[in-house]
Structure formats: structure tokens, C-alpha cells
Amino acid sequence: MDVKTKMHGCELYLPTDEDLAKEQLACLDRLYDFNMTRPTEQDKRTAMLKEMFAEIGEGCYIEPPFHANFGGRHVHFGSHIYANFNLTMVDDTHIYVGDYTMFGPNVTVATAGHPILPELREQAYQFNAPVHIGRNCWIGAGTVILPGVTIGENTVIGAGSVVSKDIPANVVALGVPCKVLREIGEHDREFYFKDRRVKESLEK
């Protein structure tokens, strides 16, 4: 089994493979260029992301600095996705994000893990598991999403959460570890923040 098959198959592999390291370095060079763009160079940023990512739809915006182990090569973005400062995507294997999802600042999405057994870590072994984030999610500031996790559509993850297990669709979830707090429902149709009413704000 070659290193790429292991890398994307949740198998133990050595990321120090010479060809793999060379490919990664080229991706990181391009990521550096993206992070050095000026705020006025929006068209340039958009063009670069289309080149860097596995897939990226229309209307996506990533606020630099953006960090990714492979510069986004294994990241699949839908359309109209927004990411605030310091989004980190440990994209050693594939990360899938649905349309209209938003990332607060300092979010980490990790696909890479290392064995618990010290002898294997000492040899630099690694494994990767893909992450799936559904459509129209809001991932709060400082959230960490761990390898192999799936988050359902429309779900809100509270700031500072550590998501170590799957979270269903249409819920508010938070905490360390992240757990479902409640379903999204009628209360959210009436109130958008504490006692602030949606209808009254939209009519102003």
C-alpha cells in the first residue's frame, strides 16, 4: 500500500516520506503567498484559493492568516463560506464543508492523529480521518474539531468547544467535550440574542 493510500485511508503511515514532504512544501509556499496578500487584493485571493483548494464554490471568503498543513489541497468548500482570522485546517486528509457555513476566529479543524503508544509516536507514525461539516453551520470562536467528526447541517457549535464525537443536525452544542444543549426551534425564530426579537430588529 503506497503512502497516499495510507494517508487517506486512516492507516498508520510516515509523513516524512520524501515525495510527500516535497509536495507539502510546495503547498505551504503557496499558502504563504496567500497570507501575504493585501486586503485590497480580493480578486487575487479568490483566484489563489481556487488553485489551492481541492474544491471551493462561489462567494467564499477566508480572512488571512489561514493555516493548513497542505495549504488547502484536501479541503472541499461549498459556496458562500466565511472564515474569520486564524482558521487552521490540518488537512492531511479530506475536510468537507457545506454551503453557508461560518467559522469564528481561531477555529481548528484537525484530521491528523498520532498513536497513543509511545514507541509508535517516537517513530513519527501518523493516521488521518476525514472531517465533515454540514451546510449552514456556525462554528464558534476557538472551537477545536477532532479527526473523524461529522457535524450535521444548521448546527451551531458554541465558542471554545472541543468536538470529539459526531454532532447531529439542527442543534446547539457546546462544551469540553462538546455535547448537544438543545434543538434549534421556535425560540430561535423569535429571538436572535438574549431578549432581542428577530421581527423587531428586521423591521427597524
Image: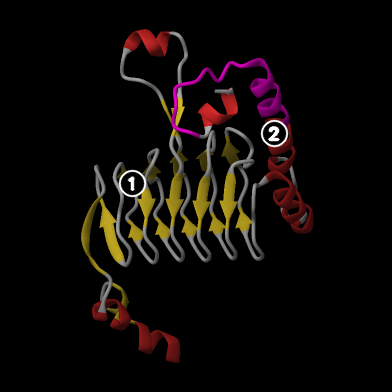
Residue 190, located in which quarter of the rendered image? bottom left
In the image, is 34 to the left or to the right of 142? Answer: right
Is residue 23 found inside the magenta-colored segment of the image? yes
Choose between 203 and 90: the one closer to the eye. Answer: 90
Q: Earlier in the sequence, mark 2 or mark 1?
A: 2
The residue type indicated by label 1 comes to: Gly
Q: Position of residue 103 (x, y in %)?
A: 48, 54
Which label lies toward us, 2 or 1?
2
Q: Residue 142 at x, y = what percent?
A: 40, 45
Which image quadrant: the C terminus? bottom left
Task: Check disc 2: other Cα within 10 Å, few if <14, some if 14-19, many if 20+.
Answer: some
Q: Which amino acid is tagged 2? A: Cys
Q: Is residue 79 above or below residue 196?
A: above
- Image location (x, y in percent) of residue 63: 61, 51
Apparent side of residue 202 relative to residue 39 in the rendered image (left or right): left
Numbered label attached to residue 27: 2
Observer able to see residue 125: yes
Q: Residue at x 38, y 39 (%)?
A: 146
Relative to 189, residue 118 above or below:
above
Give the residue displayed 31% in from the left and 81% down from the top: 189
In the image, residue 90 sits, relative to residue 55, either above or below, namely above
Residue that appears at 52% across and 40% down: 88
Residue 55 is situated, as x and y percent measured from the top left of the image, at 64, 53
Would you name the residue on which mark 1 appears? 160
Range shown magenta: 9-27
